[in-house]
Image (cartoon, rainbow, N blue to C red):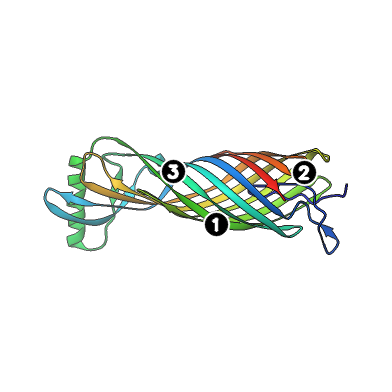
């Protein structure tokens, strides 16, 4: 059995291959397909916010709003993905992904939740101050809002990695476009992940690897809707951006079938399960 180079991807699979590049063996069969399920919960920080509506019969223009409790916003997501990948070089893997996404956003609004920004125009600022007073009159003390949406996700990425004396490491970048229905709109997401691990056991029937890692995820998201019990519309522009540690275990069965379980913790909690096959 020849020594292999360990590679760990977003949906990693590891087996043995007979292909070579400049005398260097490919770590696994060059083509792979896998399915993955992910559950993720994270908190979001507001980037921009606006409110507009009709108050006491008067037209109210769009207004910039500073929310005082942005950490009340939480987004829960469930993702199902299909991935196809290919090894260009023994240390370089490229892949494409596609699937569906279900998201739920939860947050609180109420009196004192926001301030209006001055725009430097006396007349317009006066309208905003009047608008703020009217909102205080009609806004309930506290409202818990929950919105649900679903959509499609597709994209791709690349990974470089290697192994030395059973210690492996990898660096990976993934970019995805997201198309959501309803009042939650996620336009794009980027993930950069690094991992370092150890091959605990390896033979022709079973291989077991454990690892520690960290990922940086940035998502451009928007939530819009109507504030309950009012005729006011809101729109939140959010940055979901976190550096998150992770632990995982990766198993290979008879060189072809793979199972991955990974858990990320911190402000962004993620549980991922991956099942793969290489050919």
N-terminal of the pair, mark 1 or mark 3, is 3
Residue closest to the eye, 63 or 57: 57
* Of residues 239 and 191, the one drawn nearer to the viewer in this rendering: 191
In the image: residue 145, left or right of residue 201:
left
Q: Residue at x 87, y 49 (%)?
A: 2
Disc number lying in front (2 or 3): 2
Q: Which numbered disc covers residue 147?
A: none
Choose between 123 and 273: the one closer to the eye.
Answer: 273
Q: State the SS at label 3.
A: strand
Report the disc number at residue 155: 1
Q: In 3D space, how far apart are the residues under numbered discs 2 and 1 (Cα atoms)?
A: 27 Å
* Image depth: mark 2 or mark 1 in front: 2
Q: Which of the 4 quarters of the picture holds residue 207?
A: top right
Q: Is residue 256 left or right of residue 130?
A: right
Residue 272 position in % (x across, y down)? 59, 40
Crowding near the residue tagged with mark 1, few <14, some 14–19, many ≥20 C-alpha atoms within 10 Å: some
Q: CA distance from mark 2 to mark 3?
A: 36 Å
Disc 2 target residue: 255
- Secondary structure under tag 1 reads strand
Question: Mark 3, residues whose alpha carbon is within 10 Å: few (<14), some, or many (≥20)?
Answer: many
Would you name the residue on which mark 3 appears?
A: 103
Q: Hey, which quadrant is residue 25 in on the image?
A: bottom right
């Amino acid at each position: 059995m020849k020594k292999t180079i360990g590679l760990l991807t977003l949906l990693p699979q590891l087996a043995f291959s007979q292909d070579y590049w400049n005398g260097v063996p490919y770590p696994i069969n060059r083509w792979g397909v896998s399915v993955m399920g992910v559950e993720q919960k994270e908190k979001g920080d507001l980037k921009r916010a606006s409110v507009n509506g009709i108050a006491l019969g008067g037209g109210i223009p769009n207004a910039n709003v500073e929310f005082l409790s942005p950490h009340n916003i939480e987004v829960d997501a469930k993702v199902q993905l299909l991935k196809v990948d290919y090894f260009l070089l023994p240390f370089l893997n490229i892949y494409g992904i596609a699937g569906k996404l279900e998201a739920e956003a939860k947050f609180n609004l109420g009196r004192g939740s926001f301030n209006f920004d001055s725009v430097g125009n006396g007349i317009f600022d006066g309208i905003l101050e009047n608008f703020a007073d009217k909102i205080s009159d009609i806004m309930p003390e506290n409202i818990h809002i929950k919105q649900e949406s679903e959509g499609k996700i597709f994209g791709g990425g690349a990974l470089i990695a290697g192994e030395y004396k059973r210690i492996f490491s990898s660096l990976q970048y993934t970019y995805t476009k997201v198309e959501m229905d309803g009042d939650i709109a996620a336009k794009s997401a980027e993930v950069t992940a690094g991992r370092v691990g150890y091959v605990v056991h390896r033979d022709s029937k079973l291989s077991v690897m454990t690892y520690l890692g960290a990922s940086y995820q940035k998502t451009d998201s928007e939530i819009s809707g109507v504030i309950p019990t009012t005729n006011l519309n809101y729109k939140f522009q959010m940055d979901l951006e976190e550096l998150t540690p992770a632990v995982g275990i990766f198993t290979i069965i008879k060189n072809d079938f793979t199972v991955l379980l990974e858990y990320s913790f911190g402000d962004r909690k993620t549980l991922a399960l991956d099942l793969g096959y290489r050919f």
